């Protein structure tokens, strides 16, 4: 997996920057977002698209773990659940 990360580092950096901008936008507009379910759905879609693009670049054979809080199947590479944000156990990290 490390070789895929190194090979795709420019694209991964671009995706990370886009995620950061999306999250900053959420912070800036949180009151409008909370008042409108359409915004929430659009944000979820945008974030999941970025997550999928990132996953395609780094995952060779996906190793997963179920979130201890919500049961969502997460990649072991992540520290936090992509569905609920709960911290994943350290024993699962690669």
Image (tube, rainbow, N blue to C red):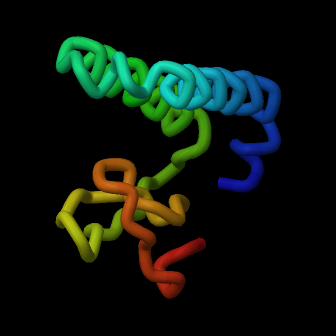
Q: Quadrant of residue 42?
A: top left
The percent position of residue 90, horizontal first and vertical second, equals: 53, 82
Residue pictured at 47% horizontal, 79% vertical: 92
**Which picture quadrant has residue 49?**
top left
Residue 81, placed above or below residue 31: below
| Residue 65, position as x, y percentages in the image | 33, 69
Position above or below: 47 against 78: above
Whole-percent x, y for residue 21 in the image? 64, 22
Residue 47 horizontal/vertical position (percent)? 43, 27
Quarter residue 75 falls in? bottom left
The residue drawn where x is 38% and y is 24% is 31
Left or right, residue 33 beside residue 77: left
Is residue 54 or residue 6 the one in the foreground? 54
On-image quarter of the N terminus: bottom right
The residue sitting at 28% across, 68% down in the picture is: 67
Q: Is residue 86 shown above or below 93? A: above
- Residue farthest front in this picture: 31
- Total numbered labels placed on residues in the image: 0
Quadrant, the C terminus: bottom right
For this view, does 12 lie left or right of residue 70? right
88 sits to left or right of 22: left
Image-based side of 65 in relation to 15, left or right: left
Above or below: residue 32 compared with residue 79: above
């Amino acid at each position: 997996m490390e070789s895929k990360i190194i090979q795709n580092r420019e694209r991964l950096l671009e995706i990370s920057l886009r995620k950061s901008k999306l999250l900053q936008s959420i912070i800036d507009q949180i009151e409008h977002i909370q008042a409108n379910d359409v915004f929430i759905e659009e944000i979820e879609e945008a974030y999941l698209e970025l997550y999928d693009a990132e996953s395609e670049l780094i995952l060779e054979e996906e190793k997963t773990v179920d979130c201890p809080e919500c049961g969502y199947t997460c990649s072991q590479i992540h520290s936090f659940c992509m569905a609920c944000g709960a911290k994943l156990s350290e024993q699962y990290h690669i």
